[in-house]
Image (cartoon, rainbow, N blue to C red):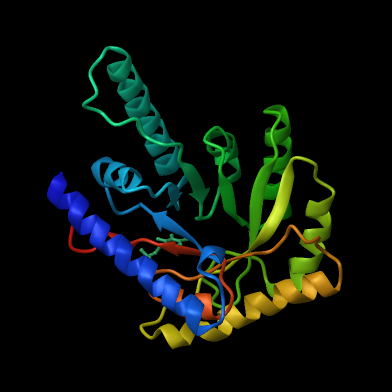
Amino acid sequence: MRQLKKKLGNNLSRVQEAIASACSRSGRKGGEVTLVAVTKSVGLEVIRALIELGHVELGENRAQALVKRAAMLEELSQRAKQATLGGQDRLEALPEVRWHMVGHLQRNKVGMVLNCSGVIHSVDSLRLAEDIDIKAGKRNMTVEVLMEVNCSGESSKYGIIPAAVNHLAEQLATMTHLRLVGLMTMGPLAENPEDSRSAFVRLREILEDMHVGRYVDKTCQHLSMGTTQDYTVAIEEGATMVRVGRALFEGL
Ligand SMILES: *Cc1c(COP(=O)(O)O)cnc(C)c1O
């Protein structure tokens, strides 16, 4: 466990330093970028070590995995509390986690994801948005969502086409239980991080145009873009959230 935490801590520092230097290269403040740790490739032990290192922004790309992991962490937290109450302090109480649903969300999984709350990065259709709005309303909550845009033009990718973004934004603006806070995209599948730059520029420009056309208000500012392959390029192009897995968990 100690060895794991040390390696993980080193990886985390390395990624945070890369984020900080990409920020300073592009004249941005470090605090503007949220690192979302995408935990799909690791087990609960690693997730727990990450939380104990103080990192609580976690992401999953599959609804079932997200819900299962959230439940397991909740149980760990409960046990830790009980142990503390019973005078044993071996287990550290875990801080509250914020879950990000970053992958394609099927409509029949909306309810279960909302039970773990958090942020949904992958709204890619009106019907999905309507389901989120209705189910969030039933739970008396407002969910933060991002719209996933297919900027690379690859047909294998989820996300709506750039030409449809404004129209969907207008429809989302009428929904009272979800709040559009930004846009998300996946870079093209490529070896070279530079190959993603044009898709990231595109996403930033789409958001700028949405502001010019008043399709969104000031609270819609997030650009969720960049993974292990290209997060530093994404930050140079304005990312406010990067979704990183492999770079955090390699060599554990
Ligand atoms: C897996 C995943 C990531 C993280 O990818 P890495 O290459 O592990 O950094 C980011 N976004 C989405 C949607 C993913 O599915």
Residue at 80% in and 45% down: 175
Q: Locate residue 128 relative to residue 9 in the image: left or right.
A: right
Quadrant of the image for the N terminus?
top left
Of the pair 130 and 40, the residue shown nearer to us: 40
Left or right: 114, with 77 as reference point: right
In the rendered image of this protein, does residue 65 appear above or below residue 194? above
Q: Is residue 152 visible?
A: no
Relative to residue 109, is residue 231 depicted above or below?
A: below
Say if residue 97 shows up in the picture: yes
Instruction: From the viewer's perspective, tell me whether residue 69 is left or right of residue 107.
Output: left
From the top left corner, tell me how far across and down residue 92 is, in percent: 29, 31
State which quadrant residue 48 falls in.
top left
Q: Residue furthest top?
A: 86
In percent of the image, x 31 and y 21: which residue is there?
A: 79
Say if 13 sits above or below 231 in the image: above
- Name the quarter where the C terminus is drawn: bottom left
Q: Residue at x 83, y 59 (%)?
A: 170
Please tell me in which quarter of the rendered image ligand 1 is found. bottom left
Q: Depth check: 18 or 66 in front? A: 18
Q: Which residue lies furthest to the left in this view?
A: 3
Residue 120 image offset from top left, x and y in percent: 58, 50
Total numbered badges shown on the rendered structure: 0
Residue plotted at (36% across, 28% down): 77
Query: Residue 169 placed where, x, y %?
Result: 78, 60
- Percent x, y for residue 220? 72, 60
